[in-house]
Image (spheres, rainbow, N blue to C red):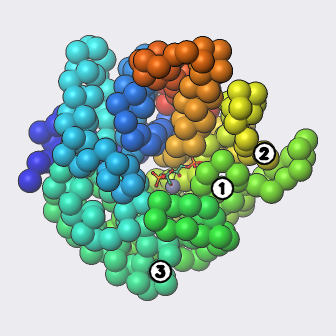
């Protein structure tokens, strides 16, 4: 058993309490490799932003669970060395079984998500409650989910969205004991979030549902998944340098800013990182076709990621300066 406390990490409890009061959102950034982790940590040190490092079960398999734990430990050493006091959580994104959540708690995670949104309401409660009992015994926080987001959620793929039913949230939170709740208000995972023609506006998020949830759960931390903006400059770069991403569109940043000022205190961003990295790598290859040193394309990609994460912290989530 390796407790997250040994690694210098914290749970999400205090971060959320501060974010709710301060009307900003903590970034939940996914990573799979060293360059992404370096970029997230560098951007958060430079902007003095608290951060939740997210690992999906796919990422855990890709990077190796033991290496991952030591990567998180290394990241915390990097933070310590910077002289900036940064609260950092290591979070399982879209955990789908009790066993996976237990394994993450045993290997240094300070927070887990149990995504029972594909189950019936009753089964979701049972599964989430079981995870909460185990996690809380180890001081680890738990995120649950009600409502279904369209798109790919790691190994769970949903074709259609089911908005969260505000009338269910109180019972879910009371019966499970979760520390935060992911809800569905019109976002979805991936780079193709809305079916709109070029130039057409994307439909607004369902802020009415969010407001009803806030009324039922005053002061309770709400999480927004699928919150990449699919930044047009990266989609353009990808297409310019040989990629083919037609009609890729995300959530406008002004809507995310509005959400961050409400009960939403964690905003999940993965796709924007993937796009920034891919765009830069494509550019380097297109402009320098002879290049074959990975540092020469992963390095610029990492720099682009730092820029992108700093922008999110400063201009979208409002988490800059809140460490
Ligand atoms: O919500 C899904 C995250 O973007 C993780 O994606 O399962 O491909 O690592 P992944
Ligand atoms: P995006 O695909 O919009 O980045 O969403 C990421 C996410 O919700 C991770 O859980
Ligand atoms: Zn998600």
Number of the front mark, 2 or 1: 2
Mark found first going from the N terminus, 3 or 1: 3
276 up-or-down from 291: above or below: below
92 up-or-down from 84: above or below: below
Left or right of 197, for residue 170: left
Measured in 3D between alpha carbons, the distance from the residue under mark 2 to the one under mark 3, in whole angstroms, is 33 Å
Relative to the observer, which residue lies in front, 92 or 214? 92
Ligand 3 within 8 angstroms of badge 3 C-beta: no
Say which residue appears at 34% left-offset and 77% top-offset.
127
Residue receiving disc 3: 119
Mark found first going from the N terminus, 2 or 1: 1
User: Could you tell me if residue 210 is visible in this image?
Assistant: no
Residue 255 in percent (x, y) is at 71, 43
Relative to the observer, which residue lies in front, 78 or 256? 78
Say which residue appears at 18% left-offset and 51% top-offset.
107
Say which residue appears at 54% left-offset and 77% top-offset.
168
SS state under label 3: loop
Label 2: how many residues lie within 10 Å, few (<14), some (14-19) or many (20+)? Answer: few
Give the number of the disc on residue 246: 2
Measured in 3D between alpha carbons, the distance from the residue under mark 3 to the one under mark 1, in whole angstroms, is 20 Å
Ligand 2 within 8 angstroms of badge 1 C-beta: yes
Residue 6 in percent (x, y) is at 12, 39
Left or right of 281, for residue 50: left
Residue receiving disc 1: 187
SS state under label 2: loop
Give the number of the disc on residue 202: none
Label 3: how many residues lie within 10 Å, few (<14), some (14-19) or many (20+)? Answer: few
Q: Report the number of discs.
A: 3
User: Could you tell me if residue 243 is visible in this image?
Assistant: yes
SS state under label 1: loop
Mark found first going from the N terminus, 2 or 3: 3
Report which quarter residue 46 is drawn in.
top left
């Amino acid at each position: 058993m390796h407790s997250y406390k040994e690694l210098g990490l914290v749970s999400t409890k205090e971060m959320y309490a501060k974010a709710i009061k301060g009307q900003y959102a903590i970034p939940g950034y996914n990573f799979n490799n060293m360059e992404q982790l370096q970029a997230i940590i560098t951007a958060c040190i430079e902007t003095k932003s608290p951060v939740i490092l997210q690992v999906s079960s796919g990422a855990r398999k890709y990077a190796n669970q033991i290496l991952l734990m030591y990567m998180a430990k290394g990241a915390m050493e990097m933070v310590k060395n910077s002289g900036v006091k940064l609260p950092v959580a290591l979070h399982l994104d879209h955990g789908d079984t009790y066993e996976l959540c237990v394994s993450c708690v045993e290997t240094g995670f300070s927070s887990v998500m149990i995504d029972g949104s594909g189950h019936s309401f009753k089964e979701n409660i049972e599964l989430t409650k079981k995870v909460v009992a185990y996690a809380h015994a180890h001081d680890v926080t738990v995120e649950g989910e009600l409502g279904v987001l369209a798109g790919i959620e790691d190994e769970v793929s949903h074709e259609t969205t089911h908005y969260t039913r505000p009338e269910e949230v109180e019972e879910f939170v009371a019966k499970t004991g979760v520390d935060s709740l992911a809800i569905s208000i019109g976002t979805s995972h991936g780079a193709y979030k809305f079916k709109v023609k070029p130039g057409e506006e994307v439909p607004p998020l369902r802020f009415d549902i969010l407001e009803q949830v806030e009324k039922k759960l005053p002061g309770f931390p709400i999480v927004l998944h699928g919150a990449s903006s699919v930044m047009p400059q990266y989609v353009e770069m990808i297409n310019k340098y040989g990629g083919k991403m037609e009609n890729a569109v995300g959530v406008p940043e002004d809507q995310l800013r509005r959400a961050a000022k409400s009960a939403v205190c964690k905003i999940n961003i993965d796709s924007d990182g993937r796009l920034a990295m891919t765009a830069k790598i494509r550019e380097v290859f297109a402009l320098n076709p002879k290049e074959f040193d990975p540092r020469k394309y992963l390095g610029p990609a990492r720099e682009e990621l730092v820029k992108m994460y700093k922008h999110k912290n400063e201009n979208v989530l409002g988490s800059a300066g809140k460490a």
